[in-house]
Image (spheres, grey):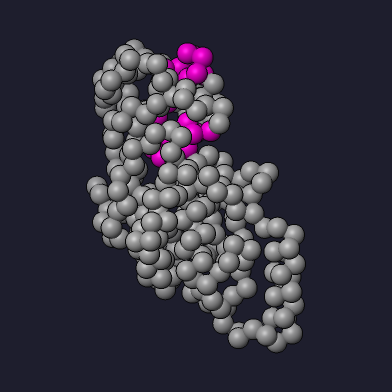
Amino acid sequence: MKLRKVTAASATVFALALTATACGGGDGDNESSGGGKDKITIGIKFDQPGLGQKTPQGYAGFDVDVATYVAKKLGYEENQIEWKESKSADRETMLQRGDVDFIAATYSITPERQEKVDFAGPYLLAHQDVLLRADDDKIKSPEDLNNAKLCSVTGSTSAQNIKEKLAPKAQLQPYPTYSACLPGLQNGAVDALTTDDSILAGYAAQDQFKGKFKLGGFKLTNENYGIGVKKGSDLKDKINKALEEMVADGSWDTAVKENFGPANYKNEPAPKIGDIKS
């Protein structure tokens, strides 16, 4: 898993660049189209291991690696990136206000969101799935969740969807966060945890949980992760080109293996730009 951080030396270079610009070195082009600003502001999750996580050493995860690659193709080095936390409920507003240039934060492309913002990508096809204990041989299909204790996270509809559509006898156990579910899953207080398989793989890949959990592989939904930009932004086409290059040169595969590999995540192939699975 790669870590992205700004070192003291990088900070010095950045400060000198700002000084030069203030003294007349800039070209006056501050449009968010790459290469015309001293920094780029990118929204990510800060609390999702394997995808977007703020750590004492920097920022890590698949979304971070994708965003860093895209930023470089837009003309920005790592020390020119300002990372900003983008919680799910705030993403459209952050883009509309111009708080960030783009967002890569497990941001599923949906018709409702496309009315408010534009999306580049998709760059990952995820699915709703369940996380189980590695030695669990009883839950082999969604229907086997009947009478099982299923972790239900406040604000998430994933567990409720399973109860309503697939396993009506599932016993929902409320927890405040996905992270809080993991010890319960490990010690048997709950039998399964459900959300996007990429998110589950990220949690399972943490050092303290390696080898203790497995994914069910149920593929209950399609989640097309895209990079959000402000409506009408010319960044969309440039980001799409960068994503195509990331796949072509092998960097996408490398990022998947480094961030999800420890959980034996069986990822889908890199999606083609504009191919949104319903």
Q: Is residue 221 above or below residue 35?
A: above
Most foreground residue, 204 or 165: 204
Most foreground residue, 111 or 41: 41
Place of residue 113 in the rendered image (x, y in percent of width and height, measured from the top left): 38, 54
Place of residue 14 in the rendered image (x, y in percent of width and height, measured from the top left): 70, 69
Quadrant for residue 157, please give it: top left
Most foreground residue, 137 or 129: 137
Task: Name the residue at 38% across, 36% down.
Answer: 265
Place of residue 124 in the rendered image (x, y in percent of width and height, measured from the top left): 36, 50
Q: Which residues are magenta?
A: 184-206
Task: Name the residue at 31% across, 31% down.
Answer: 217
For this view, does 5 lie left or right of residue 72?
A: right
Residue 186 on the magenta segment: yes
Task: Name the residue at 26% across, 22% down.
Answer: 141
Q: Is residue 149 above or below residue 91?
A: above
Quadrant for residue 251, please give it: bottom left
For this view, does 225 lie left or right of residue 94?
A: left
Q: How many marks?
A: 0
Residue 141 on the magenta segment: no
Q: Is residue 169 visible?
A: no
Q: Is residue 263 above or below residue 77?
A: above
